[in-house]
Image: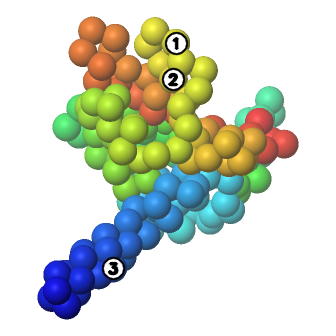
Amino acid sequence: MNSLLMKKFIIIIVSLIVSIPVFSQHSEIKVNGLILGATYTEFQLADSLGAPSRITPPNEDFPDWITYWYFDSLTGKENEFTLINNSLQQIVIRGNNIKMNNFLGVGMSTSSVNQMGGIIFNVKPNLFYWAPSEEYKSRGYAIIHFNPSNQMIIAIGIESNSDFM
């Protein structure tokens, strides 16, 4: 009797320990450890993502915007990270070498989004929006683009709802 109770207790404790990082991991939107809306230096970006393949510098139309491009040699596509006043405001994942929330990436099935929890909204035939929670939706969201014929993710757009955008 006691051993059965002890086994159940251990299973409950283990499942709680395992689930805590999973749920806390998706309370915000992160890409390679970079948090959407947070402020970063060029060194911090390079530390997390490596050296960019190219940089689109600020211009007279967008003086505070800078975009860092990262080439994915396997897919031949570029991922982009846009900062406004050093705040990470927009990310576009096109290659499969970068993951959102250390999990979701291009080439995965759209059903993988359900494993992350959160909310899905604005569903269209070839895209839908995702946010970690209803409250977070006012701060930022991800747009999951997919191929309707096979339900595979082809791009992930991540945007902040800050005053900059």
Write the residue at 53% across / 44% down.
118
Residue 148's image quarter? top left
Q: Could one spot residue 57 in this view of the protein?
A: no
Q: Is residue 152 left or right of residue 32?
A: left
**CB within 8 Å, label 1 to label 3:** no
User: So how many labels did they put on this image?
Assistant: 3
**CB within 8 Å, label 2 to label 1:** yes
Write the residue at 23% across / 39% down.
73
Q: CA distance from mark 2 to mark 1?
A: 6 Å
Amino acid bearing label 2 = Phe
Amino acid bearing label 1 = Lys
Q: Secondary structure at mark 3?
A: helix
Note whether 54 is above or below 29 in the view shown: above
Residue 109's image quarter? top left
The residue lying furthest to the bottom in this view is 2
Q: Return the mark for residue 124.
A: 1
The residue lying furthest to the right in this view is 163
75 and 6: which one is in front?
Answer: 6
Write the residue at 28% across / 24% down.
152
Q: Residues within 10 Å of mark 1 (few under 14, many from 20)?
A: few
Give the labeled residue for mark 2.
128
Residue 47 pos. (x, y %): 44, 68
Note whether 52 is above or below 129 in the view shown: below
Give the labeled residue for mark 3.
13
Q: CA distance from mark 2 to mark 3?
A: 35 Å
